[in-house]
């Protein structure tokens, strides 16, 4: 092979690699991911993402002063592990979620689709669902009301949780300022790491703005590094922002 052909082969080889980081490919268990986060990531910083509520090793919530809710009262007492980018947002990219599968049949012989079918039949989906970079502790009642709604800036709407300024309206959610930067970098990480997930143009613009407006914290940097060590893949979005953090 002459030199020019060799160089062409090298160039083609290099550009064949994706220009984005790979996501989770070591753990496909959502339950294992949740336990790992509680024991090995949040053991010394047990604070929820949206409301800054403290929780103990049994996932019991100590409600912040002024926090109120009239719905999901039992879930308000416990931490739940929230997909910041909702599972449905990337799950619908999988045919098993949208259409089901021949093997997705319950004991009564009835076919099912959605999250349960995707989780049962598709390993790629399971890896995305269990990605710890996208999982955060949240008060259960807040997780329940946020549901799978996209984040946005809402017009004048009161907080649904008293002193915790999490606002839900018309199937949209506006998070507190303290969580917006983390949310933005999580959305950006998921889009960078998984070809199955793409943000809308409107969502991209919002997350880009929040990323710039709300800088990374020392805890966010530490969290990303801990997950990288446990899960095996970096969050390059967060890591690049952490270069300027002492």
Image: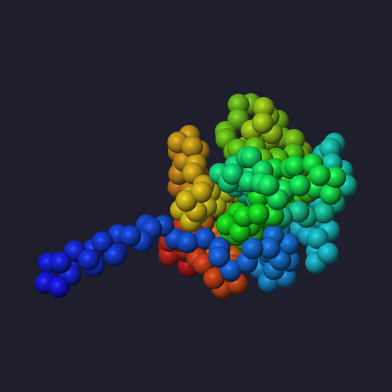
Displayed quadrant of residue 78: bottom right
Which quadrant does the N terminus fall into? Answer: bottom left
Left or right placement of residue 114 versus residue 14 in this view: right
Left or right placement of residue 66 versus residue 42 in this view: right
Task: Tell me which residue sits at (41%, 57%) in the image.
Answer: 20
Displayed quadrant of residue 135: bottom right
Whole-percent x and y of residue 151? 59, 38
Task: Tell me which residue sits at (73%, 45%) in the image.
Answer: 143
Residue toward you, 243 or 133: 133
Q: Is residue 143 above or below residue 29?
A: above
Task: Tell me which residue sits at (51%, 49%) in the image.
Answer: 196
Question: Colour mode?
Answer: rainbow
Task: Tell me which residue sits at (76%, 54%) in the image.
Answer: 80
Residue 225 in sight here: no
Left or right placement of residue 246 versus residue 130 in this view: left
Q: In this view, does 213 lie above or below 133?
A: above
Whole-percent x and y of residue 114? 68, 43
């Amino acid at each position: 092979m002459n030199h020019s052909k060799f160089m062409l082969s090298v160039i083609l080889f290099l550009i064949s690699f994706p220009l984005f980081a790979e996501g989770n490919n070591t753990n496909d268990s959502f339950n294992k991911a949740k336990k790992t986060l509680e024991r090995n990531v949040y053991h010394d910083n047990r604070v929820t993402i949206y409301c800054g509520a403290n929780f103990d090793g049994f996932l019991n919530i100590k409600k912040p002063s002024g926090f109120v809710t009239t719905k999901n009262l039992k879930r308000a007492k416990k931490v739940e592990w929230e997909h910041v980018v909702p599972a449905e947002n990337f799950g619908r990219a999988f045919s098993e979620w949208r259409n089901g599968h021949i093997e997705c049949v319950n004991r009564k012989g009835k076919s099912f689709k959605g999250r349960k079918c995707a989780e049962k039949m598709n390993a790629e989906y399971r890896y995305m669902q269990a990605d710890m970079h996208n999982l955060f502790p949240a008060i259960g009642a807040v997780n329940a009301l946020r549901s799978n709604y996209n984040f946005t800036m809402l017009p004048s709407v009161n907080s649904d949780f008293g002193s915790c300024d999490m606002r839900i309206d018309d199937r949209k959610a506006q998070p507190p300022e303290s969580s917006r930067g983390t949310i933005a970098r999580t959305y950006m990480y998921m889009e960078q790491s998984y070809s199955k997930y793409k943000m809308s143009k409107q969502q991209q613009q919002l997350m880009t703005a929040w990323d710039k407006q709300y800088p990374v914290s020392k805890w966010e940097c530490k969290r990303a590094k801990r997950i990288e060590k446990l899960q095996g893949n970096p969050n390059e979005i967060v890591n690049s922002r952490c270069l300027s953090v002492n």
